[in-house]
Structure formats: structure tokens, C-alpha cells
Amino acid sequence: MFANGGAHIPWLFPAPDTAQLEWSARYRGFLKVNADRHNRLNRALTEVRDVPATRQRIYNTLRSHRQHRNQIMSLLAPIGLDADDLVPAMTRVLQEKLPKNQGLTSYSDNVFRDWAWSNGENDAIFEAIEEVLRVDQRDGIGSVLTLGAGACRIPYDLHRKYAPSLSVALDFNPLLMLIASRVISGCPVPLYEFPIAPLDDAAAGVLQHCRAPVALGDYSDSTFEFVLGDATNPPFARHSFDTVVTPWLIDILSQDLRDFFPQVNRLLSKDGIWVNTGPLAFIDDDPCRCYSEAEVIGIVEESGFELLAVDQRTVPYLQSPHSAHGRVERIVSFAAKKRIDVEPATTASALPDWILETTLPVPTNTETTLASSSYLLTAQVLAAIDGKRSINAIAKLVAREYGLSREECIHAIRRILMEAGRTRPNSF
């Protein structure tokens, strides 16, 4: 557990030390990316001395990223992710293996959507939840757990609307939890937004002041708690909650739905209600896990639930008022009542046993063979760069070893070189 202002947030991962190493890796990765961006912007400033407008824009962007780094460092200070006793070698390895869409600041736009923009997105999403909850015949929703709470706008709105006896918001991202705990308690959080497609020069880096419409500290008849943990291994006893909410979660889990849905069942009391909302955009290498809506509903019912209501609608998604970029999402919301107990079959792990247990043999398969060939080709291409060889010359060195035609080899080398120096020409 660590303190964040007046809030105490439990750190309840199955392997807390490993989780700290993983988030330390993400934190160090963020600092590295920020430093690289800082260096590129500084170089760019020297190249546009005679172009005042461009120079001013780049300078403003540089200043925004510098202040953004300081904001993130200050927000994460209670956790001590930069502690000297964390193993640097371990954090480097973990950083290389973490999924890119689950980085430290991957969901920054969700923070601004939840607590800074006033574009109707939160209302549109919450209306879908309200629609499926109309079938709930209970006197109240009781104790509520939100799994994958993110920046916590949905559990916050549920708390204000339905006055549960207890609200628990769980997420595995400490930055999101730290921001949410401050905002919901009534402390605005300044944070820079970097829109994908800024509408003008001033929007390249926008200082937002994230704040809740009403501080939940004003509610004395109920409580709102934050927990850092893994939604696929929820750290709660069976039958702990009357209502479980899964917002924008089930299609991005590493765990199969047939294993995760029984976890939801285990957490609910008899006749408890499960509310889900979000897209069903499954992306998985295993075609069997790219479920359709009908399959999802079927697995819900197989997991001990009676489906009460389903709602489909299209909602705006991450449409920043400062960006020319935005999209819409088709979301599926449902309410299901628990009818029978169904125990989870296994304890979830994002990593295979041979990663966790270092004495086990590492299996070989097609994917690892292809990956090793890819890494080896990249290493050989980059090692062949000596300032004299052309792409054609490098191709002659490696084509025969990989059984590639000249055209295939040149295409592969071009891709490797463009990736290595993707910032700008002649930047290797």
C-alpha cells in the first residue's frame, strides 16, 4: 500500500515485486522516450534558426514535453518506481517485452476524456450503462467493483447516480489510479495533452486541468476505494460484491473469456448483477479467441449468468476538442444476473511457466524461429553499415544466407533501415 495525498491505495498484485519491476520498466521507458524526443526537438531548433514561426512551435513543444515529464515524475513519486534497488537488467528485459498498448501513458487521452473534455463522450457511454441497468429490480446496487476502471469516470458516475454502499475501482495502471484518486477527492491535476492532429500551433501541447464535477469527499454515507491489481486475478474473496462492472475491458484481456467470466461469477453474491460495456473488437493470433457478439453472450450464459438486457449503440470515442483526429466506436452493453456459482478453472498468468520458472526448458516453435531469423537479419544489416556499402552491397552479403531473391532482400533491408532511422533522413 502507498499513500497518495490523503488516499491510501493498496498494491494487490499476485506477485507484487514483479509488478513493481514491470511498472519500473514502463516508467524508465517513458523517461527514455521523453529524453529522445527532447534531443530531437533540440536538434530541430538548431535547423530552423531563420524560420521564426517554426522555431517558436518547436520550442513550445519542447517546453511542453519537459513539463509533462516533470508532471509524470511528480504523480508517480509515491510509488518509488525509480528506486535504486530495482534491478536495471531486469527492467530493461521487461521493458522490451511489454505490450506497446499497455504502456505507462498509453491511456492518457482517456484521462482527458474523463476529466478535462466537455464533449459529451462520458454522457454517451454512461447512458448505455443506465439503459441496461433499468432491468435491475433490486432496491439498490449494493457494493460495486469496477474491473479495469482506468481513469475511473465510469465508477465515479455510478457512485453519484446510484449511491452504492461501497465502490471499489481496480486497475493495473498506477498512473491512472493516482490521477483518479486525486481528481475524485477534489484535487485538480495539471497534465499536458498532446493531440494526434493538433488543430493549430497552440494545440501541439495543451495544459489541461483535470478535475471532477463534484468531489466525492462530499459523500459521507458511502465510500469510494482504489485498488491497484490485476483484473484477471482479482484480489477479493468470493461473493464480495453485489455488482461488478467491466468497462471497455473484455476485448483487450490476455486471458480467454472462458476463464475470465467465471472470475466475475466468483466475485458476485447470489443474484448479483454484472454490467459490461465497450466494444467487442477482439484482436488475437488465435482465431478461436476473436469472438463474435453472439459467442460472447453464449459464454456469459455458460458462466452461470442469466442475460437480462443488451444494448448496442455507436458512441464518440476520444474526440479531443484540440485535435482534428477522432473516431466512433460501436459498443455492446449488457446486464446479466448471477444464477449459479461457477468456479474459475485456473489462475491467470500473462506469462508462461518457462518465463516465470527459470529452470524450465524454453520451447521452440515456428514463431520463435521466425522471430530469431528476423532479429538476426536486422542485426546483420545494421552491422554491415560502414559508411561505404550501399543497400545493394549489403543485400549481396545477406541474400544467400536467407534464401531471398535480390528484390526481396532489398525490400527487407529498406524496411530495416527506415525503421532504424524513422525520425528523418540521414539520422542514423
Image (tube, rainbow, N blue to C red):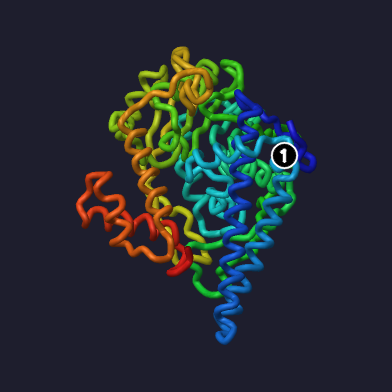
Is 200 located above or below residue 232 in the figure? below
Where does residue 391 sit, x and y in percent of width and height? 32, 62
Circle 1 packing at 10 Å, graded few (<14), some (14-19), many (20+), is some
Q: Which residue is mark 1?
A: 79
Q: Name which quarter of the figure residue 277 lies in.
A: top left
Give the residue at x 66% y 59%. 68
Give the residue at x 47% y 50%. 124
- Work out whether residue 92 or residue 191 is closer to the camera in this orientation and state it: 92
Where does residue 266 sit, x and y in percent of width and height? 51, 17
Is 312 located above or below residue 118 in the figure? above
Where does residue 316 sit, x and y in percent of width and height? 43, 54
Q: Name which quarter of the figure residue 5 lies in.
A: top right
Query: How many numbered circles does the render carry?
Result: 1
Q: Work out whether residue 267 can be spotted.
A: yes
Q: Amino acid at mark 1?
A: Ile
Q: Is residue 422 left or right of residue 268?
A: left
Give the residue at x 37% y 34%. 310
SS of the residue under disc 1:
helix
- Work out whether residue 196 or residue 6 is closer to the camera in this orientation and state it: 196
Residue furthest right as drawn: 6
Residue furthest bottom as drawn: 50
Q: Name which quarter of the figure residue 3 lies in.
A: top right
- Work out whether residue 38 or residue 390 is closer to the camera in this orientation and state it: 390
Give the residue at x 70% y 45%. 76
Q: Is residue 342 left or right of residue 302?
A: right
Q: Quadrant of the N terminus?
A: top right
Where does residue 234 sit, x and y in percent of width and height? 57, 24
Q: Work out whether residue 161 can be spotted.
A: no
